[in-house]
Amino acid sequence: MSHVLTMEDWGKQEIHDLLHKAQCFADNPEKYPFQRLYAANLFFEPSTRTKISFEAAERNLGLDLLHFEADTSSVKKGESLYDTVKTLESIGADVIVIRHGKERYFDELRDHIHIPIINGGDGCGHHPTQSFLDLLTIKQEFGMFENIKVVIAGDIFHSRVARSNMEVLERLGADVYVSGPKEWMNEEMLPRYVPMDEAVELADVMMMLRIQHERHAVKMVAGPEKYHERYGLNEEKASRMKKNSIIMHPAPINRNVELADALVESPRSRIFKQMKNGVFVRMAVLWDVLEKYKGPLWKR
């Protein structure tokens, strides 16, 4: 039989033979013809860099990918996130990467899913692998974090990148400041506030953020040009930065809004280096969680 189309095509003995074969696989996983590890990437929000760099990292480590597309999955039929993840775990995923619009979606999963979950971004909450790649980029540049002055500028309140980075950078010894529209900051962020004109002269690292229009209940009042003039990093402001300071951005970039087009690939920019580091960081994260879960997989 070369097709599996309906059960009506299968005779009784063929069915029993196939069930016996399936049970042999269930009982003897160590005797599979090929030892494989499977990763599933569940992205419920748009992504280019995070999704594709996870795929590159997974393939670099020899993982096989279980293909998932939210728009063509049972999510469209009303299946919950929990049931979707539990299904992939049952089918054989060894690690799952999830990006979801709900903040802290993982709270309902962590005590019930028995394979590693890697957060690829949760709403306005957290983005740990972005923080890791940002940390790697800063460490490559300065060799340390202590007393490095980092200014995170832009749509702070709606940024999971800002939330993840502020905490970890301060914990590692950096001095963290914020800049941008004050109405996009909460009370906890305001003590760190510096105006952009001061920020550019203060910063060793200028970390620019895009305006997350998709998370705003009310559209931006000022147009792109006015925003760029008031809160963006243009060439004139960049000319006043310290000699060895750098520009970072998690991307996607709104050119000539938060960052001048001419600065995206300027000598100060580390934006594309961040993207490159994203693959290495995600390889390390996958390696770490899978070794903790499965043992020394790549030392066999």
Image (cartoon, grey):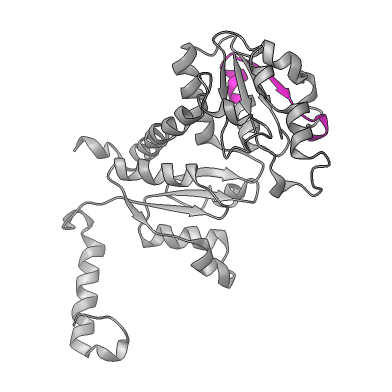
Residue shown at the point (57%, 72%) measured from the top left: 77
Q: Nearer the viewer, residue 47 or 225?
A: 225
Residue shown at the point (52%, 34%) measured from the top left: 130
Q: Position of residue 22 (x, y in %)?
A: 24, 70
Q: Position of residue 291 (x, y in %)?
A: 33, 37
Residue shown at the point (47%, 15%) measured from the top left: 141
Residue shown at the point (21%, 77%) measured from the top left: 18
The quadrant in which the C terminus is found is top left
Q: Position of residue 32 (x, y in %)?
A: 18, 58
The quadrant in which the N terminus is found is bottom left
Is residue 51 depicted above or below 76 in this figure? above
Q: Is residue 83 left or right of residue 219?
A: left
What are the residue bounds of the magenta stretch? Answer: 167-184
**Splitting the image into 4 quarters, where does residue 204 fall?**
top right
Q: Position of residue 199 (x, y in %)?
A: 71, 16
Is residue 74 depicted above or below 4 in this figure? above
Based on the picture, tell me whether residue 215 belongs to the magenta stretch: no
Q: Nearer the viewer, residue 84 or 194?
A: 194
